[in-house]
Amino acid sequence: MTTATILLPRLRIRSRPKVKRMEHHFPYENVALWTLAFAAYITVSSYVVFHVGYMQGDAYSRVDNAFNVIGTRDPHLGAIGLVWPPLPSFLTIPVLLFRGLWPPLLTQGFAGSIVASACSAGTVVLFNSGLRWAGVLRGMRWVLCAIWVLNPMTLFYATSLESEPVLIFFAVATLVIFLRWAESRRAALLPLLGIVAGLACLSRVEAVVLALFVGGAVLARSFHRGVSWRELETTLLLYALPALFTFGLWIGSMAVLVHDPLYLIHSGYGNAGNAALVGTDAPLSTLQWAGGLSYIGSRSVQLFPAVVPLLAMLAARMILRPGRLTGLLLLLMGTPIMFVDLYLLHKGQLTDSLRYQIYVIPFTFVLAVYVLRSLKSRRLLGSFVGVALATLLGFSNLATAVTMGDPHIGKYEYPFISALATGQPLAAINPSALLLTRDADASRRLASVNSDHGLVLCDSAQCNIVVTTSPDPTQFVVTSDIDFEAAAAQPAVYHVEYFLVPQPAGLSLANRLNRLYPSLWATGAGFAKLVSDLGGNENWRLYRIIGPTGRG
């Protein structure tokens, strides 16, 4: 039998290229750094809140906004409040769920301190990542991060839930991600950049202008590369859509709930409304544009003098090396918050608080990251340049402490510096700053005279401490309750027995009861009988409703 052999052409089979597996390493360094930074921040927070006894009123109000969502007589998501950017309060809600296990989370606002410390520790991780991208050796990275942690201003605002810790975290993330995108051109960074810029807007309203500046910087950087119009459009959309969607959550909520997408501007509880009612400090309200710019610039340099030599280094880098556009865009992104504050200052809507210039500190550290990235020799980073920058930033920390310790400049910060320097509680340094103690005493007095546990109506823009330190917060009808306005007009219909009203002076002129019934605190307005002078921060008076208000 003959076997036929058929010779087929040999197929050339190209083996599939091996896909290089990406190795994902657990970020041990960043986890360790966050843990150490959080431990440092929460330790200082505990000292300030429980030993010094200090808590800023705005910080406690944000904790109260979070509590309104889960613990009041009428809990609902819209109770978060819409006048202030809502993100700090939203982040506090999960922590407040444990208030039953440890009441000081609510009664002393320590839930806000935990959130502020966590965000501040996250900023340390961001700087470490930025310095590693810049090529800085680990030891020097940790030294620079320690200098950031020890800055008295950022350390102080890490102890309570003002907007600063959350704003700084997302603002630093925005700047660092932009720098990395500007160099690498990785399209995947743009949606992330849009998200963090949008979240910064949900932390503080000035960040809206920062987000617009970043969008302009993305557009300018892409146009400078000579990309096509289609690619330019795609690049801008990759950034803008996530940013607009994130920020739109707040604007859309205002449009749906209060039928006014700009309620934060038009509300009587906002800066504009308060300024119209009670004014602001005269030295600020009379400043014109040039004087306002001088005021903000001088305060910024006093707060952190290192910004001046770092700006000089940035200018030298732009002169001596190519790629000037990124440096110029970074410089411009240091101005938006300053310009917003300058506008508010000119309008008489900015208070004399040093915290409005705090952005200069993180911006200076980001400048340091960019300057270090620009160096040709990475080995220099661990020696001369790194030591020089560490020395410069460290001495600026001392200048920060001196500025905060000046009662004429750091009106809200100097009690903290004095308490740290002397080891004394706040009562011995500035008794007028004991917000929690005085209103908690008023809350106890109210509980003793309200033996029948009747409903008490009050405007929680001022009475939040009285409510949250009460044995039964559900006995209060507060501003976030859906039936608040109706109950204020017809208390008997809604079974409200008492009105809690502050003395109509200062910001309490904006209190809703004082606006509805101007003579209520003094005389009872003809329909209420004085039950007790409760004292407290606002000279509270408790009135029992004995007749119709005339607004039925």
Image (cartoon, helix red, strand yellow):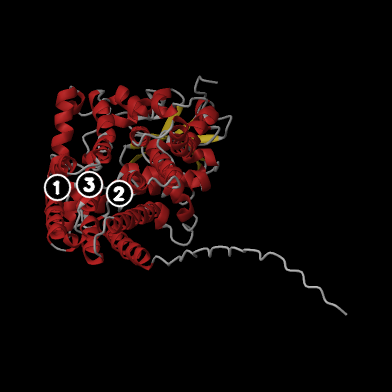
Residue 499 in view (yes/no) = no
* Location of residue 479 in the rendering, given as x and y in whole percent from the top left corner: 47, 35
Residue indicated by mark 3? 367
Position of 299 relative to 420 (above/below): above
Q: Gap in Å between the C-alphas at discs 3 and 1? A: 10 Å
Whether pointer 3 and pointer 2 mark residues with C-beta atoms closer than 8 Å, the reply is no
* Location of residue 262 in the rendering, given as x and y in whole percent from the top left corner: 44, 26
* Location of residue 450 in the rendering, given as x and y in whole percent from the top left corner: 46, 44
Badge 3 crowding class, 10 Å Cα cut-off, few under 14, some 14 to 19, many 20 or more, is many
Q: Mark 3 or 1 closer to N-term?
A: 1
Q: Mark 2 or 1 closer to N-term?
A: 2
Residue indicated by mark 2? 55
Q: Gap in Å between the C-alphas at discs 2 and 1? A: 29 Å
Q: Residue at x 41, y 29 (%)?
A: 264
Residue 460 in view (yes/no) = yes
* Residue 13 sits in quarter: bottom right
Q: Nearer the viewer, residue 323 or 173?
A: 323
Residue indicated by mark 1? 306
Instruction: Say what amino acid the circle numbered 1 marks.
Output: Ala
Q: Gap in Å between the C-alphas at discs 3 and 2? A: 32 Å
Badge 1 crowding class, 10 Å Cα cut-off, few under 14, some 14 to 19, many 20 or more, is many
Q: Residue 36: which disc?
A: none
* Location of residue 468 in the rendering, given as x and y in whole percent from the top left corner: 43, 48
* Residue 383 sits in quarter: bottom left
Q: Residue at x 34, y 62 (%)?
A: 34
**Which of labels 3 and 1 is toward the front?**
3
